[in-house]
Image: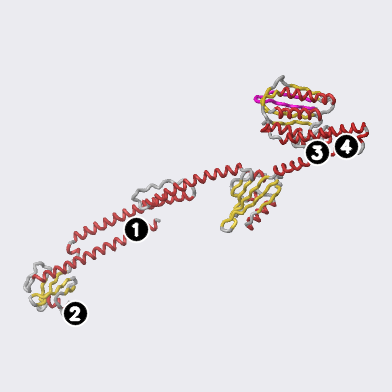
Amino acid sequence: MLKHERRRLILLSLLAIVGFFALGFGANEAVHQHQREALKSIATVITKDTVPTKGDLHIVDLAGNSLRARDLRSHTVSGHAPRANSFDLIHPHGKAELVYRAEVDGELVAITQPRQSLMTVAPKLVVSAALLYWLLIIMLLGLRVHADRKLRQELLSLQTALHAMRVGQVAQPVLVTQHSRIFGLVRETQQLNEALASMRRHMRVRSARFARLLDYLPQGVMLIDADRNVVLANPACGDLLGIVIGESEHPYVDDVKEYELVHSIEAVLASGVSEHRELTLDATGKTVDASIVAIRDDNQVAQVLVILYDLTEIHHVEKMQADFVANVSHELKTPVTAISGFAETLLGGAKDDPAALTQFLEIIQKEARRLTTLINDILTLQRNPATEERKTVNVAEIVQTTVNNLQKVADKKHVKIDVTMPTELLVTSSPGRITQIVRNLIDNAVFYNREHGVVKVVVQPETAGFRFSVADTGIGIPEADQQRVFERFYRVDKARSRNNGGTGLGLAITAEAVRALGGSISLHSELNVGTTFTVVVP
């Protein structure tokens, strides 16, 4: 910019010099023209005998023999005979003289006068005008330099503001007056800066909302650009892949170690055709539904969006449903087969034997009761908790009634039931659900206890409910089975459960009842030591 200003200043100086000489030339020409007009005017008023009053003005008879007449005739520039009403410029003695030829009293005379110029006419005025001219030129050039420097500063400020806008920083206002040559440009830049700032604020808000949405999205999301770098990824994606994904851009292979998933991503990047597949991630053992979507820009793959949907729980539920159907079929088939078989045996003639008749009818009755219990338990699991009526319940009374009903069974196995609870414990809850919890847990403690064992039942009031725990001295539950005992039809000892008439739904019903009441259930068990179930109901 400094080089351009220097060139412009030199050009302006040259123009000023040329202008100075042009003005001088024009002024001289004006003086010359004025001198010609003056000589013409003199020719109209003189006679042949007129004597000039000015010392530098001469009237010469061209037809005479005077030295000056001969000199004028010999210095004719055109070389032709002199004629009236013509001018000529001669230099007889090295000095320029203006000659005007006119016809006076019928004869041709020459009026001569040294050629005039600005310096000869008004030398002081010329010097003063020249000084004034150059002073004015210097002032104008100074103002121009000052204006250029000011404009340069304004342009630098504007450039700084535009750079800040380009890189997303806050641009400082550019201060100029209304008379500035870039006032309109600065005003438009300020409006553009305000518009960009507003747009960036909206973008930050939308970006923050999108980031929060991604953070809470249960599906794993990863965006990969054409250079195979991770542009963004949410925490759920890292959880599924078993790693912590960094926020800065990095190659996606640093995060994705599964060959099948990498193969699918590379195939989509190469072909631009989206893929969808189900695969199991080795790092976490989770089964995911993977969608690899190609995002195109001008018929080229610009980005690849990877969406991982966790199917592990769904597969687990599907397996539980399949197991439930299989177990229900098996549990229903066993008593139905027994009832059908013994009924067919009786109809085949066994009914005529009184002893066999009684024995087979007792078996049919037992299996029918077992079938009824199974159906009731299944219906209990399918019941909607919202339909349960809540009212004042005496928990101590329910516990005591259950213990009384099981006392004969406990005495038969020589199992002692020790109960610790207040005389009365009133809560507002579902009596049916509480009865299921109490009955199933005490039933299990008695049935799975050893001979001469002990069952300890403890009921304690809580701030807004009660705590109910049942501890036995039975066979215990292996640690590998403790997480599954609340599943439907799951039995730790299947043979013993069926022999005791259990359906495998007791703990599942208990857990469902606790969940419906908004409570919690936990267990602590050691093999050959015993098991303790603890329920907290709000």
Residue at horizontal 37 percent and vertical 57 percent from the top: 5
Q: Secondary structure at mark 2?
A: loop
> In the image, which residues are magenta?
455-472
Q: Do residues under tags 2 and 3 come within 8 Å of each other at their CB atoms?
A: no
Q: CA distance from mark 3 to mark 1?
A: 109 Å
Q: CA distance from mark 1 to mark 4?
A: 124 Å
Camera sees residue 274: yes
Question: Real-space Cα distance between discs 1 and 2?
Answer: 50 Å
Task: Classify mark 4: helix, strand or loop.
Answer: helix
Residue that extends furthest to the top in the rendered view of this protein:
423
Residue 360: give x, y in percent of width and height.
89, 34
- Give x and y (percent) for residue 355: 92, 31
Tag of residue 342: 4
Nearer the observer: mark 1 or 4; the answer is 4
Mark closest to the chain's N terminus, 2 or 3? 2
In the picture shown, does residue 241 fall above or below 90? above
- Give the label on residue 332, or none: 3
> Which of the two discs, 4 and 2, labels the residue nearer the N terminus?
2
